[in-house]
Amino acid sequence: MHEGELPLDDGVAARLIAREFPELRELPRNRVRSTGTVNTIIRVGDELVARFALLGATAAELTAEAAAMAEMAAACPFPAPRPIGVGSASEEFPSAWSLHTWLDGETAHHDRHAGSESLARDLATLVDSLREVPVRGRIFDGRGRGGDLADHDEWMTECFARSGRLLDVPTATALWTRLRALPRAGADVMSDRDLTPFNLLVTECDGESRLTGVLDSGSFGPADPALDLVAAWHLLDAPARQTLRAAVGADDLEWRRGAAWAFQQAMGLGWYYETSNPPMAALGLSTMHRLLADEELAALTG
């Protein structure tokens, strides 16, 4: 999916796991096929999973990620992975890697639960609970989404240039021009920072979609309070989005900035993963279509 990915065969993974965690030597290991874009994932026994960064990571980076995961797991009202340890780089795999607890379940789909009011309420519970975690003087670290929308203009320009065959680029460009100028909606709060369908476990219970787990929580940290509202646009149709909006009490500015972050994330998925990861590309295009079809957002551009 990315230039410069680190290869990892199953034999190397087995040796790395046995070297760093000898007590796990005899457990079965199975490669997990997923839509993830960051790690090669190896399940270890029934309860653990090893993640090997596709583009490499340092021990310090993964140690910080583990601390974020532990903090989120302690605060999250739904099950979330907990860190077990960090493996060191070696000649066979020149990157640190990590070991976490495994969560069973099926990941969400961008259109399978679109009308679910129960899922909308669960997502609101998640967002509210994470926002209540004390920031303790921390601020946005400048990585990825969650700071200044206008910082992403160069990337968005490239995305617009590459997406002409996929969506209405003139309309998208006009909407981004309005969204990028929206002022901050408030001080940083604690945020998952990546509430996409592939990081959410959902089950069907009595005909309702319910949130049962949150994956890939290593980016948990302070960010724009609107950032986690991306989940509304990635997962829900217009009525269900309004249920989530009302439940978190988002005013017009916060709601529109949440749409802006969803736009920034989705706009790059369609063309970038068109051939290498079609489910991720489909998510991006689905979210963009929701954004471009929304009447409130359309009114911003006249």
Image: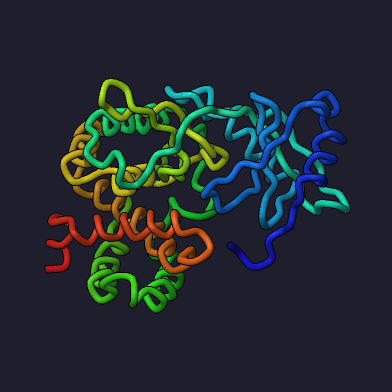
The image quadrant that residue 173 belongs to is bottom left
Q: Position of residue 193 (x, y in %)?
A: 46, 44
Seen from the viewer's position, the closer of residues 206 and 142 is 206
Seen from the viewer's position, the closer of residues 13 and 215 is 13
- Taking the spot 41% from the left edge, 57% from the top edge, the residue there is 265
Q: Is 293 rendered above or below residue 79?
A: below
Q: Is 31 rendered above or below residue 301?
A: above
Quick one: quadrant of the N terminus? bottom right
Left or right: 216, with 172 as reference point = right
Left or right: 265, with 253 as reference point = right
Residue 205 seen = yes
Q: Position of residue 132 (x, y in %)?
A: 40, 27
- Taking the spot 32% from the left edge, 22% from the top edge, the residue there is 205
Q: Position of residue 220 (x, y in %)?
A: 52, 38
The image quadrant that residue 60 belongs to is top right
Q: How many marks?
A: 0
Q: Position of residue 282 (x, y in %)?
A: 38, 57
- Taking the spot 26% from the left edge, 42% from the top edge, the residue there is 114
Q: Is 244 rendered above or below residue 37?
A: above
Q: How is the image coloured?
A: rainbow
Left or right: 33, with 258 as reference point = right
Quick one: quadrant of the C terminus? bottom left
- Taking the spot 71% from the left edge, 54% from the top edge, the residue there is 56
Residue 190 seen = no
